[in-house]
Amino acid sequence: MSEEDFMACIVLPKYSNAGERIDSGVLASYAKKMAELYGGVTVRPTTLGCWEDESGKLQCEENVVMCSAIDTRNLSSREIENKKRDVLRLAKRAGEELGQAEVMVWFDSLDSVEFVEGKWKKNISESLKEKDFFKKLMD
């Protein structure tokens, strides 16, 4: 009997502490690692993270959130704990590489995780494609 399914999430900065933009390839490498560890990753490319500094002023920065749902049906308790430790190790690596004092990680329990099978297609049908060139460029 395994524990509940869960979601593992990590929050990474989009800018260094000096305000320099972090290369998107660096951030993509963390998304790739989560996909390798968990079979997939959902990336929320922009989220605002705020905290109160020593003077009581609210400080905010732009971050990226990466989450992976873990289906625990076929995992032992030990394998589940290893999966949780994997994201903690990834957060530690990110904190050291990106110069962060802390990297936020959280685990959410899920009632269940289902991956509903579809049918992979390289292209979608013509009726589903955007045809308005102006609108396509504006999105």
Image (spheres, rainbow, N blue to C red):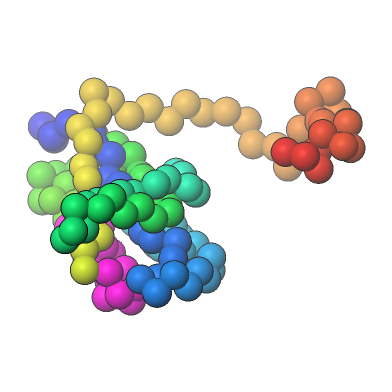
Rendered position, 101 above or below 68: below
Residue segment shown in magenta: 85-100
Rendered position, 131 above or below 87: above
Residue 19 visible in the picture = yes
In the rendered view, does 72 fall on the left or right side of 47? left
Q: In terms of image quadrants, where is residue 30?
A: bottom left
Q: In terms of image quadrants, where is residue 62?
A: bottom left
Rendered position, 14 above or below 40: below
The spot of residue 22 in percent (x, y) is 48, 70
Residue at figure coordinates x 33%, y 29% from the top left: 113
Magenta stretch: dominant SS? helix
The spot of residue 24 in percent (x, y) is 53, 65
Q: Quadrant of the C terminus?
A: top right
Residue at figure coordinates x 13%, y 34% from the top left: 3
Magenta stretch holds residue 97:
yes
Magenta stretch holds residue 21:
no
Residue at figure coordinates x 44%, y 70% from the top left: 19
The spot of residue 74 in percent (x, y) is 23, 39
In the rendered view, does 62 fall on the left or right side of 132? left
The spot of residue 13 in percent (x, y) is 38, 61
Q: Quadrant of the N terminus?
A: top left
